[in-house]
Image (spheres, helix red, strand yellow):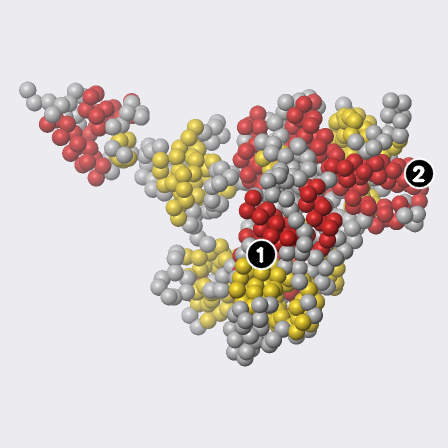
C-alpha cells in the first residue's frame, strides 16, 4: 500500500509543535515515510520553500518567520545605553522585524548602523530575549563623511576633511539637504563607487561655517561620532536632582578638604586633606583623606542618566569646550565639590607610615564641604612660601600638612619605581573669539605630583577593598610591552650607547635607568619617545592583569566618576559591598562588566583621537600665518615615506616627504628606525636635531608639511627642482594627515 505524504498544512503544524526538529529525516520519521515517499517529501519541501511557506537552512526547514541559529543581520545602530541592535537582513514574517541585541567581544570589528554581519543566536535576557554573537562582518553600512560642500551646476561636491582620504563625493541635486557653498556638512556615502567615477553621497546635516574658530572641535565631534546632545529624558532626570541630606552618611564637614585642579577646570570631583597621625603606634605617620564626588547617588543603574553616561563612556575635553559625560546640572553643580557647599562623597581614609607606605585604609560614604577651590599654581605658590589671600589662612591646616604627607608618599613612590617618562603637555590658549592666542607647554609642579600620587593611592585602595570584599570591579589594565617592541627599543637605545638586557622579566626600573641615563642630554627626547612607543594601550577589564606602567599588581579607577564611567562602576561596587544603599552595582551590571569594559575602552580611545585631532588643527591654524618660516625641532618618527619632525616651540608634528630629502635615494631600516643615504651614507634617525622650513599648513585637516634644511647643524642638499614632494610641488594636506595617522596607528 502506497504511503500517504502529508499535506503542506500538516507539515507546518508539525514544525510549530516540534521546534528544533526541522531536518527532512525528522519529518519523514514523524510521518512514517520510507523509500519513494521520502523522495516525494523532498520534492514537497522544495516546492514549499519556493512558495515561501518555509525557510531552509543546512537541510533544515522551519515555518516562515522563525529565525535560524545562524543568520545575516543588519545593524540598526546603538541605543541610548550604547548597546548595538540589529535586525534580520531578510524578514518575511508577520509584523515588524525582530530586534536582536548584538553581543561583541574585544576582537570583534567595530560595527555601526547599516553594517551587515553574520551572527549566531544565543540566549538573551528578559530585556533582550533575542541576542546574537558576531561571527564576522560581511558588509559595511553607509560611510559617514565630514567635508566642505561646493555647489555645482548639477548638484554639488563634498571635499572631505577626513585625514585618511583624498577623494571627493558627488552630491545629486536632491541630496544636498539645502547646503550652501563652502558650508561644513555631514554626509553618508550612497553605495560603492562605480568604475572610476566619484562615489555618491547625501548630506544629512549642515554644520555651519568651517572658518569659524569653534568649528574645529565641532569637526572632531562629528568625525569621531561623539554624542554631544543629551536626550530629553536624561536632562529631565538631571533637572529633578536635589542636594543630598546627611542622612546615614558620615559627617566629614569638619575635615579641612580642598580641591586642587587646573585653573580652567570645568568640574571638581576630588578633594584632599592631610594631618599627622595621632596613633602612638604610627609615630611620624600621616593620615590622608581623599574624598570623591558621590555620583552613584544621583546616577542610578538603568536610569536615563545612567544609559547616556554609559553610552558616552567619558567626558571629552577640547580647548574651547567640553562634551561632558553628565549634564551640567550634575557635572558642574550637584556632583561638583565646589567650595562652601555640602556635597555627598565616597571617601577613603589612608594611613601612611613615616616612610610613606600605606598601612591601612577605610572607605566611607559621607557628606563633605570643601574649604577652598585652589588651582595648582595657587597651591604650589603657598607651598613655596608665597601664599595669596585665599591660601594664607589655609597654610597651617591644609597646605603644609598636605605637602608633608606627600613628601613621604612620594618617597614610597620612588621606591616603587613607576615608569618615569618626561613628556611635557601642551596647552592651547584661545581668545574669547575662539582664536589661538598662544601655544605653550604646561609647567609640571609638585602640586600636580601631590594630587597624582594621592589619587593613585586611593585607586589602589579601591581595588584592594573590592577584592577583599570578593566583589567584581573594572580594573585599569596596562600590560607589559611585546617582545617585538622591546627588540625595536633595544636597537634604538644601543645606537646612543645604552643597553637593555635580554632574557629578563622586564621591570619599569630598567626603563627608568635608560631614561635617567639620557636625562639632560641630546638623546633625552628620542629615548623618552621610543620608550613611550614601546608601551601597550591601557584598557579596562573585569580581569586583573596588573598595571605595568605604574608597577602595581592591581589598579582600579575610583577618583573621577564625573568624567569616567569606569569610576562610577567602582563606586557602585563599593556601595553594594558595604551595604550603603540600594544604588549599588546590580547583578545585571555585574554580568555585563565585560561588555561595559570593551565599550568604555573604545569611547576612551575615541575621545583621545578626537582631542588629538583638534589639537593638530588648532596648531595648524596657529602656524598657518608662518608658512615659509624656519623652526628648530627633533626627528620624532621615521617611516619609509619620510620623516616626522616635532617642533620645539609648539610641539607640533609634521612630515618631511622622503622625496624632498637631499639629492639621493634614502634606504629605510625598520629595526633601527633610520633612513640612510645610498651615496653619502648619511644617517637620519630618531632624536636628531633638525632645522626645517614650514612649507604648508592646512587648518581644516591639521596637516603640516616641512622642508628639511639642517640635520645636527649640517646643511642638507636642496632637492632637485620638480622632485615629487619638493617645495615646487607640495604634498596635499589630506595626504600628509593620512600618512601621519598611518604612522600613529602603528605607534599605538
Drawn side of residue 34 relative to residue 710, left or right: left
Tell whether 43 sits left or right of 242: left
State which tag comes first along the sequence, 2 or 1: 2
The residue wearing badge 2 is 396
Q: Position of residue 675 (x, y in %)?
A: 57, 63
Q: Quadrant of residue 704?
A: bottom right
Instruction: Find disc 1 in the rendering and name its residue.
Output: 672
Exactly how many numbered labels are in the figure?
2
Task: Give me the residue at 85% from left, 42% from top.
Answer: 372
In the figure, 112 relative to 205: above or below? above
Say if residue 600 shows up in the picture.
yes
Q: Name the residue at 41% across, 65% down.
A: 198
- The 10 Å Cα crowd at callout 1, few under 14, some 14 to 19, many 20 or more, is some
> Which label is found at residue 105?
none
Q: CA distance from mark 2 to mark 1?
A: 55 Å
Residue 284 at what x, y percent from top left? Answer: 89, 30
| Callout 2: SS | helix
The residue mark sitting in front, 2 or 1, is 1
Which residue is at the front of the view, 239 or 527?
A: 527
Q: Residue at x 68, y 67 (%)?
A: 712
- In front of the other: 453 or 150: 453
Q: Residue at x 55, y 78 (%)?
A: 720
Relative depth, front residue between 136 and 205 = 136
Horizontally, residue 58 falls left or right of residue 658, namely left
Any part of residue 304 in sight: no
Amino acid at each position: 500500500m502506497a504511503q500517504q505524504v502529508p499535506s503542506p498544512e500538516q507539515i507546518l503544524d508539525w514544525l510549530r509543535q516540534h521546534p528544533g526538529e526541522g531536518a527532512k529525516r525528522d519529518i519523514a520519521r514523524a510521518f512514517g515515510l520510507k523509500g519513494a515517499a521520502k523522495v516525494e517529501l523532498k520534492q514537497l519541501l522544495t516546492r514549499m520553500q519556493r512558495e515561501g511557506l518555509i525557510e531552509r537552512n543546512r537541510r533544515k526547514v522551519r515555518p516562515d518567520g522563525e529565525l535560524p541559529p545562524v543568520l545575516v543581520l543588519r545593524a540598526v545602530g546603538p541605543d541610548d545605553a550604547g548597546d548595538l541592535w540589529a535586525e534580520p537582513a531578510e524578514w518575511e514574517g508577520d509584523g515588524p522585524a525582530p530586534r536582536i541585541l548584538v553581543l561583541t567581544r574585544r576582537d570583534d570589528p567595530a560595527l555601526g548602523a547599516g553594517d551587515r554581519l553574520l551572527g549566531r543566536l544565543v540566549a538573551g535576557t528578559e530585556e533582550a530575549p533575542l541576542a546574537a554573537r558576531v561571527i564576522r562582518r560581511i558588509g559595511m553600512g553607509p560611510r559617514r563623511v565630514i567635508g566642505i560642500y561646493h555647489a555645482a551646476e548639477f548638484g554639488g561636491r563634498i571635499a572631505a576633511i577626513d585625514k585618511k582620504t583624498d577623494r571627493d563625493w558627488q552630491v545629486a541635486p536632491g541630496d544636498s539637504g539645502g547646503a550652501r557653498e563652502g558650508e561644513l556638512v555631514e554626509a553618508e556615502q550612497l553605495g560603492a563607487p562605480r568604475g572610476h567615477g566619484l562615489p555618491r553621497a547625501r548630506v544629512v546635516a549642515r554644520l555651519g561655517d568651517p572658518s569659524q574658530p569653534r568649528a574645529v572641535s565641532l569637526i572632531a565631534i562629528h568625525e569621531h561620532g561623539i554624542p554631544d546632545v543629551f536626550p530629553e529624558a536624561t536632562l529631565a532626570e538631571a533637572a529633578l536632582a536635589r542636594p543630598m541630606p546627611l542622612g546615614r552618611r558620615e559627617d566629614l564637614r569638619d575635615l579641612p578638604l580642598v580641591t586642587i585642579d587646573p585653573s580652567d577646570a570645568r568640574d571638581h570631583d576630588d578633594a584632599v586633606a592631610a594631618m599627622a597621625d595621632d596613633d602612638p603606634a604610627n609615630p611620624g605617620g600621616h593620615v590622608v583623606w581623599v574624598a570623591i564626588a558621590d555620583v552613584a547617588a544621583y546616577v542610578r543603574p538603568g536610569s536615563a542618566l545612567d544609559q547616556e553616561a554609559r553610552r558616552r563612556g567619558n567626558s571629552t575635553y577640547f580647548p574651547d569646550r567640553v562634551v561632558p559625560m553628565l549634564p551640567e546640572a550634575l557635572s558642574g553643580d550637584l556632583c561638583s565639590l565646589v567650595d562652601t557647599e555640602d556635597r555627598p562623597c565616597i571617601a577613603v581614609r589612608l594611613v601612611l607610615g613615616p616612610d610613606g607606605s600605606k598601612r591601612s585604609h577605610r572607605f566611607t560614604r559621607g557628606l563633605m564641604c570643601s574649604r577652598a577651590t585652589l588651582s595648582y599654581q595657587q597651591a604650589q605658590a603657598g607651598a613655596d612660601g608665597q601664599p595669596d589671600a585665599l591660601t594664607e589662612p589655609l597654610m597651617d591646616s591644609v597646605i603644609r600638612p598636605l605637602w608633608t604627607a606627600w613628601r613621604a608618599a612620594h618617597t614610597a613612590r620612588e621606591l616603587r619605581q613607576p615608569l618615569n617618562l618626561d613628556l611635557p603637555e601642551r596647552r592651547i590658549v584661545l581668545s574669547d573669539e575662539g582664536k589661538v592666542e598662544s601655544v605653550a607647554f604646561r609647567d609640571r609642579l609638585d602640586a600636580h605630583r601631590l594630587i597624582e600620587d594621592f589619587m593613585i593611592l586611593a585607586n589602589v585602595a579601591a581595588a584592594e577593598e573590592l577584592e577583599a570584599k570578593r566583589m567584581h570591579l573594572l580594573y585599569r589594565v596596562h600590560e607589559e610591552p611585546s617582545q617585538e617592541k622591546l627588540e625595536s627599543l633595544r636597537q634604538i637605545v644601543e645606537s646612543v650607547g645604552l643597553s637593555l638586557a635580554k632574557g629578563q622579566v622586564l621591570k619599569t626600573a630598567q626603563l627608568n635607568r635608560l631614561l635617567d641615563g639620557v636625562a639632560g642630554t641630546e638623546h633625552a627626547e628620542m629615548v623618552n619617545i621610543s620608550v613611550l612607543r614601546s608601551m601597550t594601550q591601557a584598557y579596562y577589564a573585569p580581569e586583573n592583569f596588573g598595571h605595568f606602567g605604574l608597577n602595581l599588581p592591581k589598579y582600579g579607577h575610583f577618583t573621577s566618576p564625573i568624567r569616567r564611567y569606569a569610576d562610577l562602576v567602582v563606586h557602585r561596587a563599593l556601595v553594594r559591598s558595604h551595604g550603603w544603599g540600594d544604588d549599588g552595582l546590580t547583578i545585571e551590571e555585574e554580568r555585563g562588566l565585560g561588555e561595559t569594559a570593551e565599550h568604555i575602552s573604545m569611547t576612551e580611545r575615541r575621545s583621545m583621537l578626537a582631542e588629538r585631532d583638534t589639537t593638530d588643527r588648532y596648531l595648524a591654524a596657529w602656524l598657518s600665518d608662518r608658512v615659509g618660516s624656519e623652526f628648530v625641532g627633533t626627528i620624532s618618527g621615521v617611516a619609509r615615506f619620510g620623516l616626522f619632525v616635532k617642533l620645539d616651540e609648539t610641539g607640533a608634528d609634521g612630515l618631511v616627504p622622503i622625496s624632498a630629502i637631499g639629492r639621493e635615494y634614502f634606504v629605510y631600516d625598520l629595526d633601527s628606525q633610520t633612513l640612510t643615504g645610498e651615496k653619502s651614507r648619511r644617517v637620519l634617525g630618531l632624536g636628531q636635531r633638525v632645522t626645517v622650513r614650514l612649507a604648508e599648513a592646512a587648518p581644516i585637516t591639521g596637516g603640516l608639511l616641512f622642508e628639511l634644511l639642517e640635520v645636527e647643524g649640517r646643511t642638507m642638499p636642496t632637492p632637485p627642482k620638480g622632485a615629487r614632494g619638493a617645495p615646487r610641488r607640495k604634498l596635499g594636506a589630506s595626504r600628509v594627515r593620512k600618512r601621519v595617522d598611518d604612522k600613529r596607528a602603528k605607534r599605538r
